[in-house]
Amino acid sequence: MRTLRVTALVMLAAVSVSSCAHAVMVEPAADAADPDCAEVMLRLPDEVGGNERRDTTSQATAAWGDPSAAILRCGVEPPGPTTTPCVSVNGVDWLSEEAGDHWLFVTYGREPAVEVLVSNDAVGGQTVITELSGAVAVLEQERECVSVEDATVVDEEGQ
């Protein structure tokens, strides 16, 4: 999950310089121009966790709150198999990792992937991903998270 931590640092820099009402400076993801990101962006809510949506400086990004309580980027590299904790919210699997005073969530099993950085001081991470999962659900789910405790082992014959 080193990639998540590096991404969080880049996004944290955007949060720290965006505490006024101007557009939030957010680095675009590598695949921000993916047409599927446009579908996600069209479905994003105007408010998340009581925070109003703000303008951002990059394609396929969104931010809520002043200072930013949550920042979303669509088009990040989809994560591969990992042991990072995963939660399923309204049919969308999210990898979750604490990054200092923020939580970083990245969709799992959907391409392009979406990441959301949430400030612990402003809003609960569960609230944010619950309110964003409907928009993200338009991306086709190709894989899903499984836990070792709940995993079913299937042999080649399906038994």
Image (cartoon, rainbow, N blue to C red):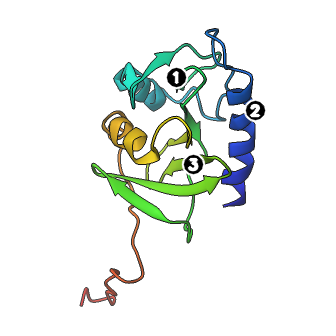
Give coordinates of residue 10: x percent, y percent: 74, 38
Of badges 1 and 2, the one in the foreground is 1
Q: Amino acid at mark 1?
A: Gly
Note whether residue 27 is visible.
Answer: no
Label 3: how many residues lie within 10 Å, few (<14), some (14-19) or many (20+)? some
Quadrant of the image occupied by residue 15: top right
> In the visual, does 147 lie left or right of 20?
left
> In the visual, does 114 lie left or right of 132?
right
Please tell me which residue is depicted at 40% across the width and 75% down the height of the picture: 147
Quarter the N terminus occupies: bottom right
Residue 95 in the image: above or below residue 26: below
Q: Amino acid at mark 2?
A: Ala
Label 2: how many residues lie within 10 Å, few (<14), some (14-19) or many (20+)? few
Q: Amino acid at mark 3?
A: Trp
Q: Which mark is residue 103?
A: 3
Question: Judging from the image, what secondary structure is the residue with disc 2 in?
Answer: helix
Give coordinates of residue 138: x percent, y percent: 33, 37
Q: Which residue is mark 1?
A: 65
Question: Judging from the image, what secondary structure is the residue with disc 1 in?
Answer: loop
Q: Which residue is mark 2?
A: 13
Disc 1 and disc 3: Cα gap in Å? 16 Å
